[in-house]
Image: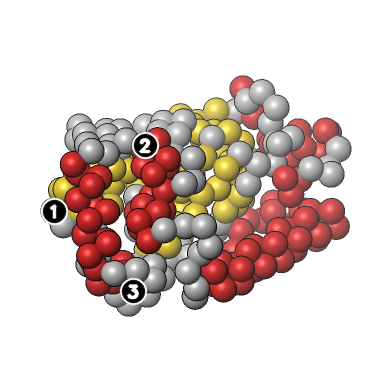
Amino acid sequence: MFIGERHEKSAQDMPGGLRDIRILANLPPKELALLAAECSWRKFARGDIVVSAEQSGGDREVWFVVRGVVRLARSTSADGRIAYSDIETGGQFGEMSLFGVEDSGLTVIAREDCVLAVMPEAVFVELLGREESVSRALLTQYAKLLRQRDAASAAASTTLPGTTGTQRIYGELLALGEPRLANTGAKPGLFIARLPRHRELADRLSTTEEVVAGAIADLIRLGIAEREYPGLLITDEEAMRNLSGTA
């Protein structure tokens, strides 16, 4: 089920088509035009749900982010912790299911107004078999992701140099926040539906419960966030990024 207003367009209505998609960068314009015609084109407003958890794991398709940014949310453990990753213009998602890696429970939200091109499984599989440049680009992309994850795991095991416990807390809260849906009528911002316990955040970020409690209290005092039990609403994302050192 798609949530939020979805606008279907033809490839001819989309300036630039697939030319900015990174794994397709070495294909000639004529080939890109033919592939664009095989896709369904969809527009989403900021905050719209692109793919719901109930919908994921159904039809196998590859989604290309032609314009904008989407956020992927996946459950990573039995305790309910969610991992977030953003796919910007030129990226894609959904292709792992074509290789037998199911992604049930995935939720995708538009972080800003965006245009997506959706390619059927059969078209993408045929493309990989026919165009070596696309297969090579995809493998290179996966290799870089694995290297980044290894580096992130190593960094997470130690205190990051040059950052304070408070900065790490703010960075983690930013990563946990999801854009509140535009059609809910509620106050906009980045919403954390279930704020982790202070001890959980402290253990995860190599700091103390007192630092966690103080950091969150400061956000509320400064008007950067509001408590919406059991969650937290970040109302000023820019200020939060400045405090975290990620601006």
Q: Check disc 3 and give the amino acid type.
A: Asp
Left or right placement of residue 222 versus residue 46 in this view? left
In the rendered structure, which disc, 3 or 1, sits on the residue that comes first in sequence?
3
In the rendered structure, which disc, 2 or 1, sits on the residue that comes first in sequence?
1
- Which residue is depicted at the point 18% across and 41% down? 221
- Give 186 or 34, whichever is nearer the viewer: 186
Which residue is tagged 2? Answer: 239
Left or right placement of residue 220 versus residue 190 in this view? left
Residue 73 appears in view: no
Q: Position of residue 144 (x, y in %)?
A: 70, 62
Label count reads 3
Task: Answer few, some or many: residues within 10 Å of disc 3's Cα (few below 14, many 20 plus, some between 14 and 19).
Answer: few
Direction left: furthest residue = 229
Q: Are marks 2 and 3 in contact (CB under 8 Å)?
A: no
Residue 196 appears in view: yes
Query: Measured along the vertical axis of the image, is residue 236 above or below residue 64?
Result: above
Q: CA distance from mark 3 to mark 1?
A: 22 Å
Q: Which numbered dot is residue 229?
A: 1
Q: Position of residue 147 (x, y in %)?
A: 67, 67
Task: Answer few, some or many: residues within 10 Å of disc 1's Cα (few below 14, many 20 plus, some between 14 and 19).
Answer: few
Which residue is tagged 3? Answer: 203
- Give 137 or 36, whichever is nearer the viewer: 137
Mark 3 or 1, which is nearer the eye?
3
Mark 2 or 1, which is nearer the eye?
2
Q: Which numbered dot is residue 201?
A: none
Query: Measured along the vertical axis of the image, is residue 206 above or below residue 132?
Result: below
Left or right placement of residue 74 versus residue 60 in this view? left
Q: Check disc 1 and give the amino acid type.
A: Tyr
Q: Secondary structure at mark 2?
A: helix
- Which residue is depicted at the point 51% across and 57% down? 162
